[in-house]
Amino acid sequence: MKKALKAAFPHTIPIFAGFWFIGITYGIYMNVLGFSFWYPMLMSLTIFAGSLEFIVANMMLGVFNPLQAILVTLMIQARHLFYGISMLDKYKNKGWKKWYLIFGMCDETFSLNYTANIPKDVDEGWFMFWVTALNHFYWVSGATLGGILGSFIKFDTSGLDFVMTAMFVVIFLEQYLKEEKHWTALIGMVVSIVCLLIFKADNFMIPTMMGILALLTAFRKPIEREGGFS
């Protein structure tokens, strides 16, 4: 278990930097809206959904509409359905850890657990558990700290969310360089661009995920033969 923690921690350091920036921003934002630090702490601990938590903060200020809440949550988090499908084999036979791995599978954790080269002498289940737990801790601690400090410090936080964008670019490039052939990267880019042009920025995410899943499923065998999956 300790060996898995030591192996997992270095992989999560870039996530720590991003999560603390965005988490602190989220905590400060909640404070500005009038919520005590308990709110961002508990919401980050139980929801653990990044951008959705910002939207929930605004929902809490209005009239409760359960149908709207369900639809917004589904629209924003639908990509996790596709993440879950791709992790079925990895999470299989992981015992009690499987349930926490499912709960804690955010974008960044999925990327690390899916692409990381786990040392042969390290248990895969414990490695993925620690990646998930560390990322969860980074987000909760950042949100809590932001909620506490929000009433004492004031600064312009515009632009901090670009940290996440930059990090995903790095993760994409790392995965791209691992592949012998770049079919999966090309499929992802082409489908994303086409869906962005057709459905526009506010609505292209779900069609993009569906298109990528359909093409990867249809062409999985030839892509594997060409070395397109790492």
Image (cartoon, grey):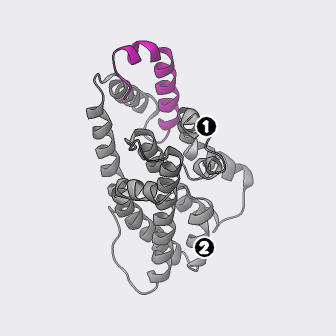
- Residue placed under numbered mark 1 in the picture: 92
Q: Where is residue 156 in the image (x, y as percent from the top left)?
A: 33, 72
Q: Where is residue 71 in the image (x, y as percent from the top left)?
A: 66, 45
Considering every residue shown, the one lying at the far bottom of the view is: 152
Q: Can residue 207 be seen in this view?
A: yes
Relative placement, left or right, of 32 versus 223 is: right
Q: What element carries label 1?
A: loop
- Seen from the viewer's position, the closer of residues 191 and 201 is 191
Q: How crowded is mark 1: few (under 14 residues within 10 Å), some or many (20 or more)?
A: few
**Main SS type for the magenta part?**
helix
State how many labels appear: 2
Look at 58% across and 49% down and name the residue there. 101
Of badges 2 and 1, the one in the foreground is: 1
**119 over 188 or under it: above or below:** below
Q: What stretch is highlighted in magenta?
A: 202-230
- Seen from the viewer's position, the closer of residues 218 and 133 is 133
- Seen from the viewer's position, the closer of residues 227 and 77 is 227
Numbered badge on residue 39: 2
Look at 72% across and 61% down and name the residue there. 64
Look at 43% across and 36% down and name the residue there. 200
